[in-house]
Amino acid sequence: ELRNDAKMARWAMGIRDCPAGQINIEEWTGPDLTEYNELATKRVPQPNCLRHASEQLRGKDQELMLHAIKEYWFAADHLALPLRDSKPFWKKVLEQNEQTGWQAFGNYAPVLLREDQELMTLALQMDPFALHYAGPALRRRRSFILDAVQRDWRALRSAPRDFRCDSQMLLAAAGQNLEALEYAAGDLGNIALCAVQPPSKQIMEEQKEVWTGLQDADEVERLAKQKQELKKEWNRVMLCLAETHGRALSFMRPTGVDKDMTTTAIQSNGVALAYAEAHYREDRDMVNESVRANIGSCSGLVWKPDAKPPELRDDLQDDFEEKKQKLKKRGTLKVKKEGARQSQDR
């Protein structure tokens, strides 16, 4: 009978509906427990004691379970049917606590509900890491992953590997923050890794010798063409990012960046000049392109000074009398006047 009492379950978990030291015994359906009042007040709360409650209470008392999950999100582990499979119930769990609701949903909701796009979208609005708990069907849906990445670039780190190799995914994520390139995978991820953390020349030469020795001539030629296409794709993505992030131009160095690419990046974003190669930053045409992109072209009008120069304001004019008194005390004012008279006589 006590295991089926909702108020007893709340008190055992440390969730008090009344001030500490008071128990509303009159509303309880169980026997008189007044003698346990002091003991229950002093005891340490035990959130996991919910597992001892009756299955009927854990499966039908929605108010109790919502209250328990709001206080301790891991209390969702003790849910029973039919609440465990209820979509409206899990929607309330997500809405009642934005900080921990998505954790309870991601860890303890059934797979069928974690494949529900509405619930997962609500969880992603609270934390992009919730994509890690999406059902298998949703994690294979490209449109859903792309929408999550466009909403928050941090969702890319929880996306499946196949989508982290996608140039459109990288462009959508890196357009918000260039740190998203660190989560790229596959061949584009290798280029991104070299761009963000360039390896030493010695390591690159050793890798090249080992790779050439393992492959025959035809395979090397095919890989060279594939690598060239990857470089073009990478440069295309970086040029698109350079429109909003000038620093993207510096990530093109591992794949090779020529004057035309640099000019294109600077024309779309003049700030990109700061991340160009040193000899390009000293080029007059490049500097002019950067100025045109940021400020605009020169009007060609000759600058003319004002006909009347502005009147100079004496900063000491306000306290001139005070300065004069100090000079008299020092005797320097008299010396200055005598010097001025001598110069006039001459």
Image (cartoon, helix red, strand yellow):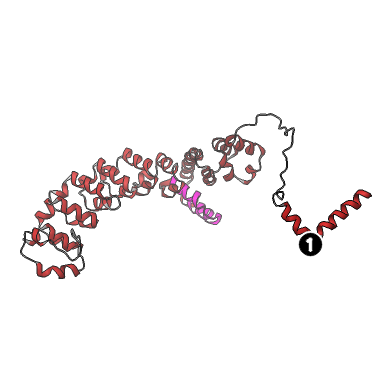
Question: Image point 16% across, 59% down: which residue?
Answer: 10
Residue of label 1: 330
Q: Specify few, some or many for label 1: CA neighbours under 10 Å numbering under 14, 14-19, or 20 or more.
A: few
Number of numbered callouts drawn: 1
Instruction: Locate residue 13, reporting x and y percent.
Output: 18, 62
> Eyeballing the image, is 204 above or below 235?
below
> Eyeballing the image, is 19 above or below 314?
below
Report the front residue among 183 and 301: 301
Question: Image point 24% across, 46% down: which residue?
Answer: 114
Horizontal side, residue 46 vs residue 236: left or right: left
Report the front residue among 221 and 20: 20
Horizontal side, residue 228 vs residue 322: left or right: left
Report the front residue among 92 and 276: 92
- Please state the extent of the stretch shown in magenta in the rendering: 188-212
Placement of the N terminus among the 4 image quadrants: bottom left
| Helix, strand or loop for the magenta stretch, by majority | helix
Horizontal side, residue 56 vs residue 319: left or right: left
Instruction: Locate residue 177, reporting x and y percent.
Output: 45, 45
**Residue 303 image-quadrant placement:** top right
Question: Image point 16% across, 46% down: which residue?
Answer: 86
> Eyeballing the image, is 270 above or below 70?
above
Instruction: Locate residue 17, reporting x and y percent.
Output: 18, 58
